[in-house]
Amino acid sequence: MSAANLLQVPEEHLFGSDNLPYGLFSTEVESRRRLGVRFGDAVLDLGGAASALGSPHAEVLNGDSLGPLLASGLTVWREVRAELRGWLRPDAGEEIHDRLLPLLRPLAEVELHLPFEVADYVDFYASEHHATNVGRLFRPDGEPLTPNWKHLPIGYHGRAGTVVVSGTDVVRPNGQRKAPTEEVPSFGPSRRLDIEAEVGFVVGTPTRLGQSVPQSQFREHVFGVCLLNDWSARDIQGWEYVPLGPFLGKSFATSVSAWVTPLDALDAARTSPPARTHALLPYLDDSGDEVEQAGLDLRITVTLNGDVVAEPPFAAMYWTAAQQLAHMTVNGASLRTGDLFASGTVSGPEKHQRGCLLELTWGGREPLQLPFGQRAFLENGDEVTLTAWAPAANGRRLGLGEVTGRIVGGA
Amino acid sequence: MSAANLLQVPEEHLFGSDNLPYGLFSTEVESRRRLGVRFGDAVLDLGGAASALGSPHAEVLNGDSLGPLLASGLTVWREVRAELRGWLRPDAGEEIHDRLLPLLRPLAEVELHLPFEVADYVDFYASEHHATNVGRLFRPDGEPLTPNWKHLPIGYHGRAGTVVVSGTDVVRPNGQRKAPTEEVPSFGPSRRLDIEAEVGFVVGTPTRLGQSVPQSQFREHVFGVCLLNDWSARDIQGWEYVPLGPFLGKSFATSVSAWVTPLDALDAARTSPPARTHALLPYLDDSGDEVEQAGLDLRITVTLNGDVVAEPPFAAMYWTAAQQLAHMTVNGASLRTGDLFASGTVSGPEKHQRGCLLELTWGGREPLQLPFGQRAFLENGDEVTLTAWAPAANGRRLGLGEVTGRIVGGA
């Protein structure tokens, strides 16, 4: 493909000018990490473009992280996006396109990096279908949903330092595991290694300690979304998690997509969350105008070694990201630029809509029959890829990139 | 006190030349944050001293964070400490002391800051006495210790972004709470605000993903200790924590002392942990020579509005910090410089040795009778201070500084 073609992106392309997600890239000859925006099958060097075209926001686009743009706030996010859309329009003019062309790199020639430094990482548990299934599997003698589940979005802090970018190999974790039938725990590589298909939300604008963020201010603080795979060692998790929650069963790796899609690209995907079955306290109530359509219609596909194993619908999530942010800050906990909070496993009501193997194989008892063999949990060499799309204007679709990882044996 | 006296620190001083903890300070006239070491009742400007005396380590001492020193590794930690001890010896010579004197600031004239950027924050649950008491209070119908407790050091990730330095006011958190006797949850300021007296461990040397740190390598990775108060809203915690652990009941604030005491100052405080009642898996086994005396004899005092309410003994902790680090990394989770992991509430076997109000007042049912009134949990305006000392050579004592915080009402 000649360089000139890189600017000719068909309207129906998943990464057209309605999308424009941000990432961090380098190339073999230019090893410095630079901010880029994905357009079609190429990456535009954002700092370079901002300099070449005299953007007033060149300073936040010229660094080696998405951090400065994240920190610059909603007004700047929108100004930068409007500027980019202007530059990339087919009718932007030859002068602009001539300056952009040398700053485009075909995707195949770039290496993508973790786009921002993760400050705190929080993982929620927002799918009623997932929580119900897991409750049945982990606590067969009790009610599947705990009494608090419909009153607050349950969440916990995960390990920020082990969030890795898509494409990073995942080392099978060692740890303690004890089945209920065993007398004492044993140690070794996890035998029940799993995925969790999730959507992550990236915080831009920070808050001070003691401040809370109502649902109506969600857009001022959250910049965009990524895809996220919260790898989980079910045997380690099952033994460790009572009473203080998941720890080593999750902390070995969490993979995120290399592209962060700005919320402004997802307006056509906004949708109403499921009907609420319980009255909510005012800070979580989302029945009002201000916070309507706080759900997002994102369609996720999970593939294992290239075969589709699940299609989880994000629209089915009971708790919205705006409710999660309101809850997370209602105690006065401050936000930092780079905070990442994830939805929890996305599972829908149907069997093929379940976002983890634990559910798909019902605790391993009903292995998946796949062309390459059967799978209860992941084997070494397995590669899992999540992709997703969202509805856009005029019946078109936006791509949310992918998050992929391959399991490798431990040392 | 004249400046000259600041270098004359009596041998029995809690912050003599055997101690030398590190911190970050500024003064009213010099607002730039600088690395300092506490000596007696003063702070020595470390970057200034390193430059004035030609230290080979001036580069890691001259910044506005402890981070570069933390990242420089055990050999440099020891060389810097040896250098400092040399400079501060009474017989170091007039030339050296003349150069140091202008770089000393009386404690009363400095402001102390959070000494390093907290990467990930992990909180353990390592006191058998505390876990047993809390188990009895939170789960009165079950065994107080969960089946895993004696097999692994239970822990969870906390919020790194709300770790604050001693002296920072603590805003009473709002949140959901529901007593077992109530039909539905209510919202408002926590009515059961508590402390947790803990010891924090600060990671210096990082690891790569997939690498684990055996107990025998603890000293290569952990730089030192601080005091830590893990403020806890018991009513919020009690309603939210099943099944994924503490979240908003803890995430509003965690206070740490302004001084980080290097492990090399605590050799005389090393002691054996309590006898193990259960066989441990090899990575946690601490019966061997290499890891013996991995406990620390630190004596903590908790005061509430100036009155002593508890004296928790750190030597009673069942799990050691070396075991915690080995456990935290055994799944391949990487460490970053600035990772902070805390012991969990320090409680001893005696009633006055309990490190939180939940235990001291037995769930609020037996309020403390104090000169200023009775207390089940904290009231607005209450000030809590933790201090600690450790045995040093020749029967002397080292101080571990203090962590203090005052409760203020919410917005």
Image: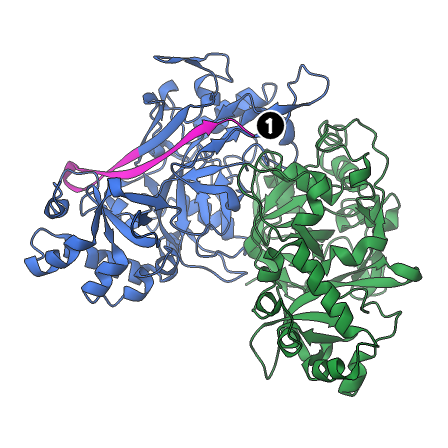
Chain colours: A green, B blue
Placement of B58 over or under A40, stated as above or below: above
The subunit carrying tag 1 is B
Task: Give the residue pinned by disc 1.
Answer: B236
Give the camera-side residue of B300 and B50. Answer: B50
Left or right: A9 with respect to B30? right
Left or right: B411 with respect to B382? right
Magenta stretch: give its range. Answer: B388-411
Report the predominant secondary structure element of the magenta stretch: strand
Location of the C terminus of chain A by quadrant is: bottom right
Say if the magenta span includes residue B392. yes
Say if the magenta span includes residue A48. no
Placement of B39 over or under B178, stated as above or below: below
Give the camera-side residue of A72 and B201. Answer: A72
Q: Residue at x 42, y 29 (%)?
A: B406
Give the camera-side residue of A264 and A348. Answer: A264
> Which percent across, then down, holds residue A38?
73, 70
